[in-house]
Image (spheres, coloured by chain):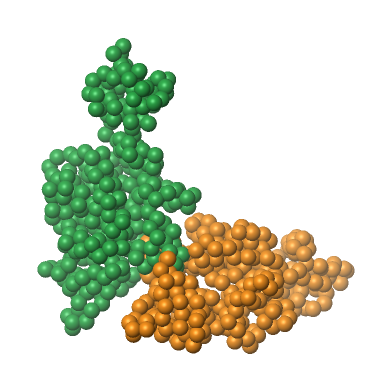
Chain colours: A green, B orange
Amino acid sequence: MKGQILNALRECGGYLSGETLSQQLGISRVSIWKHIHSLKRDGYAIEASPKGYRLVSSPDLLLPCEFPDLEQRIHYFPEIGSTMDAARELAKKGAGEGTIVIAEVQTLGRGRLSREWLSPQGGIYFTIILRPRISPVYAPRINLMAAIAVAATIRKLFGLKAELKWPNDVLIEGKKVCGILAEMDAEMDVVNFVNVGIGINGNNPVSRFEKTATSLKDALGREISRKEFLTALITEIQRRQPLLMKADLLKEWKRLSATLNKEVRVMSLGEEVMGQAIDIDTTGALILKGKDGSLRSILAGDCIHLRE
Amino acid sequence: MKGQILNALRECGGYLSGETLSQQLGISRVSIWKHIHSLKRDGYAIEASPKGYRLVSSPDLLLPCEFPDLEQRIHYFPEIGSTMDAARELAKKGAGEGTIVIAEVQTLGRGRLSREWLSPQGGIYFTIILRPRISPVYAPRINLMAAIAVAATIRKLFGLKAELKWPNDVLIEGKKVCGILAEMDAEMDVVNFVNVGIGINGNNPVSRFEKTATSLKDALGREISRKEFLTALITEIQRRQPLLMKADLLKEWKRLSATLNKEVRVMSLGEEVMGQAIDIDTTGALILKGKDGSLRSILAGDCIHLRE
């Protein structure tokens, strides 16, 4: 409801009376007043005068009310250990497909294999709960889907040439702008849920010592609207969900891939494999061609691009 | 410690003084007395006389003290909803490899795909937490391993020709005596834990209306020692853990398999496939040969044996 009030105030642009809001949204004027009060507490500057309410300014926060279509499904935290942990708890308790946990800051953000993922103010950190009825063997396709959605959003909104590094990093000019972590809970027959955590370097500073990372702000030379980005990204994810098990998903990944045709080194569960990345298979595994021409598929791992 | 006291009393066969027990186990006589008291509360009849303590009778329960080597790792419940749920909670909190949850009765026992698994008194119901460092793609091998261990235990202890039905049922004369359910928590790279739930029809009654099920008691014509069975089974599981990713595991499964070479019908995520079961692959998938000679691998599902 707060999202709808915000929308109405933004569309109006000037003063909107409590009476009009009340009629438009079908709730009492007292309810309107309470929601306005709550928005003020969230950091929105809303002027109240005899002419009505007027939105003066909005905080730069990814509050649920900024996403009116998703508001009911968003769990928002100014600061949290990890959105993955919160999402897991929610998923265990039965939270539905499409539930989203957003945090402004993560104090214990993590990447693949329990690595640290720095999550200072200004980035975009969220986990989305997905419940596809697929075999766990195909779960890595969800990773691919999420990476495609991030790259597509960056290309659409900013015209930057975002590319994918297998399995699920998003690069701009060879530097990582987004990391993705998927955790699943499954029987051998079927996935129960897959939580996809996406961390995007948005307006947050990226260490100058970190030569392999970049942010959208650094790549564009200006700050981005995190709300606009997240709204577009969720749309891109949702649009691709029905395509999860279709060949088109793999085609799109290949089109955006920076890994294919490169010589790569992959570390996978303690083992190191080198070769030319020539394809991915239906489970999302990378197919490497060794110097002797032998083919090998790698299910998951850390991939380093060596050369074309 | 209670397990060690029980062991000592059993080995002695007659009276064992508190003094001797105290010296043998390196704890005070007061501690001995407390443990004896606790054993009595558990249902053990222990006579205390000036000559010492004597074990008169033991309850037919799978109490941790009956498994002295595993005592520390066993979580025991006279009655529980599901050992899977308890094990999941424990695993999330970091419970180590080999932690075991045992219940005499499950009120909400479940099998694959949330099906009910009747768990009345007399059966053997437990979940073991495993933490192999493998890709989730290979997790179904854990199912195979568990099924092999159950069949091997039945063959060793009772000489019954236990066989395996893909993916992980154990049959005696074509009737199901054991069901296995594995649930995993994983990243795309690596399994975090796999909880393997094993439900065995031991001395519990099996419905006469259930033509496809049997119990060890019915197959043998006498009651079994559940303690002996569970001890042997855990040993068989532990013995095979280092073999999880070895070819020998698949060979052993094939040797025990009742599915291979049969015409089968498999229902898998709403799809039905028929063919001759000719092999399993390295991920545990069943390879079916269709009438037109085409091969197809099935990752998981319900398998019905049609004929040789």
Q: Can residue B144 be seen in this view?
A: no
Q: Which residue lies furthest to the front in this view?
A: B291
Q: Indicate the quadrant where residue B221 lies.
A: bottom right
Residue at image coords 85%, 67%: B48
Q: In this view, does B244 lie to the left or right of A225?
A: right
Residue at image coords 16%, 50%: A155
- Image spot of residue B180 (x, y percent): 54, 71
Q: Is residue A246 left or right of residue A81?
A: left
Question: Depth check: A7 or B90 in front?
Answer: A7
In the rendered view of the protein, which quadrant contains the C terminus of chain A? bottom left
Q: Residue furthest top?
A: A50
- Looking at the image, is A105 positioned above or below residue B97? above
Question: Depth check: B250 or B56 in front?
Answer: B250
- Image spot of residue A49 (x, y percent): 30, 13
Q: Residue furthest right?
A: B50
Question: Depth check: B154 or B24 in front?
Answer: B154
Residue at image coords 22%, 74%: A288
Q: Indicate the quadrant where residue B61 lies.
A: bottom right
- Looking at the image, is B200 positioned above or below residue A159? below
- Image spot of residue B269 (x, y percent): 42, 66
In the rendered view of the protein, which quadrant contains the N terminus of chain A? top left
Q: In this view, does B78 lie to the left or right of B95?
A: right
- Looking at the image, is A52 positioned above or below residue A154? above
